[in-house]
């Protein structure tokens, strides 16, 4: 007996016949341009139910905190350590360094080239350089608080190039107590004026005196104000700046104290 084949029976026939019998496989969701509303709702519920990784959040917060900490430290270092030709405020540099000095400007204007002086103790005496006063007998000065006064040039010492001025007050002669700081070659110092300069002691054995300057090729010695005070890394007054030719020369506090002591002895 002949047995026929039924092409509609599952599991038999060619591949083309099977494609006609069975429906095609569904297209994966990521390959379709549309979504069924039930799929969208399902994905939303899945995302909402996904647990939050506290580990990843903790790492992000730690990284952010470390970055902000580094930025704050760098900012403090830059503020506390003024660089050459920086525009940091002179009063702020004195406060940060702990320097116990009172800046005085020999003129009503605040310019880079305005000569400077330093008040001795609480006054009334001011010390500066011979080049800062020139041939003047009276100078209008500006104190840190902004007040201006007419002061007399009471003494000029040609040997040390130091000039002494006096505020118009009737007080007894003060005692002199200026720090005597050793100066060594290569020592870093800070010159305080309208423009802050971070310099180094270039020479101490030269006939020209203690020469300070910068190893930067573009350093301009005449950008340093005449009579500007110089402090060391601990904020102690080291001396005053004067110019000798193209050099910035440091008049140390020991020389200043000697001139003041001699002046008081004659009063």
Image (cartoon, rainbow, N blue to C red):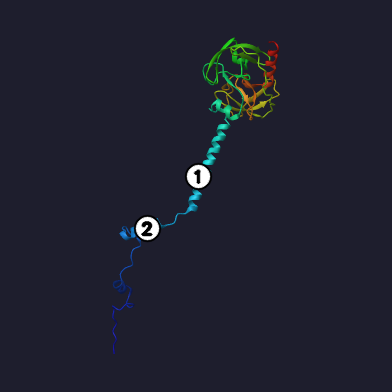
Crowd band around label 1 with a 10 angstrom C-alpha radius: few (<14), some (14–19), many (20+)? few
Q: Quadrant of the C terminus?
A: top right
Q: Write the residue at 63% across / 11% down.
A: 154
- What x and y, as percent, mark residue 76? 55, 35
Callout 2 touching callout 1 (CB < 8 Å):
no
Q: Quadrant of the N terminus?
A: bottom left
Report the residue marked by disc 2. 45
From this view, report whether residue 89 is shown above or below residue 124.
Answer: below
Horizontally, residue 38 falls left or right of residue 200, namely left
Q: Nearer the viewer, residue 244 or 87?
A: 87
Q: Residue furthest front?
A: 171
Q: Write the residue at 33% across / 73% down.
A: 15
Q: Nearer the viewer, residue 197 or 264?
A: 264
Secondary-structure class at tag 2: helix
Report the residue marked by disc 1. 64
Work out whether mark 2 precedes mark 1 in sequence or the reverse, and give the earlier one.
2
* Residue 214 quadrant: top right
**Separation of marks 2 and 1 at Cα, in angstroms:** 31 Å
* Residue 161 quadrant: top right
């Amino acid at each position: 007996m002949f047995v026929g084949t039924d092409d509609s029976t599952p599991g038999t026939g060619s591949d083309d016949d099977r494609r006609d019998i069975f429906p095609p496989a569904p297209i994966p969701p990521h390959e379709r341009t549309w979504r069924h509303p039930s799929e969208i709702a399902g994905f939303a519920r899945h995302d909402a139910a996904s647990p939050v990784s506290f580990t990843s959040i903790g790492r992000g917060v730690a990284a952010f905190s470390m970055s902000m900490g580094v930025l704050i430290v760098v900012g403090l270092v830059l503020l506390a350590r003024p660089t050459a030709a920086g525009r940091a405020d002179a009063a702020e540099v004195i406060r940060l360094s702990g320097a116990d000095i009172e800046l005085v400007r020999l003129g009503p204007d605040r310019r880079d080239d305005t000569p400077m002086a330093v008040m001795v103790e609480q006054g009334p005496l001011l010390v500066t350089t011979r080049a800062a006063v020139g041939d003047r007998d009276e100078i209008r000065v500006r104190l840190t608080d902004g007040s201006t006064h007419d002061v007399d040039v009471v003494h000029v010492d040609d040997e040390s190039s130091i000039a002494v001025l006096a505020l118009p007050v009737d007080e007894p002669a003060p005692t002199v107590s200026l720090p005597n700081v050793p100066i060594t070659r290569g020592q870093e110092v800070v010159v305080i004026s309208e423009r802050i300069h971070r310099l180094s002691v270039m020479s101490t054995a030269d006939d020209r005196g203690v020469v300070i300057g910068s190893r930067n090729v573009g350093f301009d010695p005449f950008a340093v104000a005449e009579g500007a005070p110089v402090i060391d890394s601990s904020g102690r007054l080291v001396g005053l700046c004067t110019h000798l030719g193209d050099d910035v020369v440091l008049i140390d506090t020991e020389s200043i104290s000697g001139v003041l002591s001699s002046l008081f002895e004659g009063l």
